[in-house]
Image (cartoon, helix red, strand yellow):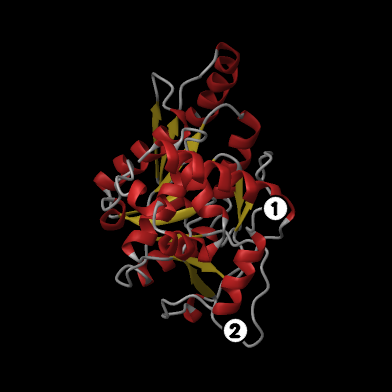
Amino acid sequence: MNAPIALFVYNSPQLTQRVIKSLLSCERASTSDLYIFSDAAKTSEDQRNVADVRSICRNISGFANVYIEERAENLGFSGNLISGVSYVLSKHSKVIVMEDNLEVSPFFLKYMNSALNFYENYGILSISGYTPPVDMPRGFESSTFIMYRTCRWGWGTWREQWQKIDWSVPTFDAFIRNSAKRKELNNSGNDLCYNLLRWKIGETDDWSIRFTYAGFLLNEPTVFPRKSLVRYIGSNANNVDGACSMPLAANVGLSDFSSGIAPNVEIADEFRRLYALPFLTRVLSSIKYCRYLLFHK
């Protein structure tokens, strides 16, 4: 049985139409349930676009079933996603999660379902459909690899893994004071500790860094495909890795999934290079660390 799709939408009718069209192009779309979570407008300026998005969603067909949750109050993206995924996983054992700023390969749903089935008992936190533009090592044959960081652009997980997460991050203070642990988390990119600190001090409301941190604590990595099956189509300042222009893989070798659960050293180096913080941001992060430690003894 296919995993249901949880789609999170807000105030972009054009992007909503594109992601729906993209998902409908996938093999298995017609046999997959679609759950849509439409957040309420945060401002009066957003109300018209939110209404247009909801009108589009109410007229979707082509999936096995379509369920729509129109939020009465604005939950924010993290609140909408965490509660929405939790709801779907209260009814199903696994889920595929999409945002309204993505396009996928026609092979996406087949890959995601196959990977969710294959890796269910491997101690994996999540399955990513997106892979950043990193070079694969010479002689690397597997169609998948693992990293200790999650990806928010088209992913899936299981009920058992999701229910382990404490979104309040009660271990943060002990973690931030442990330089060895900070270094270990940053093995998958030195932006990770900085992003977790920014969430803690209220600069962001980022669910994905808390998801990555949970995987770090559980020692449960994320599986990535060798070639990306998801492309980012939104526009924001954080799109630093060329995802808008990335070609989508036509397919992934489903019989070539890696059963290893240790990161490839060369791929890990590529991730650290790609997600390395600029010098001035590193300086700023050091100042924020010191300030936090000084005032939170």
Q: Give the camera-side residue of 111 and 99.
A: 99
> In x, y percent, where is residue 169?
33, 45
> In x, y percent, where is residue 80?
41, 33
- The residue positioned 32% from the left and 69% from the top of the image is 123
Q: Locate the N terminus and report the quarter of the image it occupies.
A: bottom left
Q: Does residue 70 appear in this view?
A: yes
Circle 1: element type: helix
Tag 1: residue type? Phe
Q: Which mark is nearer the camera, 2 or 1?
A: 1
Tag 2: residue type? Phe
- The residue positioned 39% from the left and 33% from the top of the image is 79
Q: Does residue 62 appear in this view?
A: no
> In x, y percent, where is residue 133?
68, 64
Within 10 Å of disc 2 (Cα), the crowding (few <14, some 14-19, many 20+) is few
Report the disc number at residue 279.
Answer: 1
Report the disc number at residue 140.
Answer: 2
Q: Give the camera-side residue of 38 and 272.
A: 272
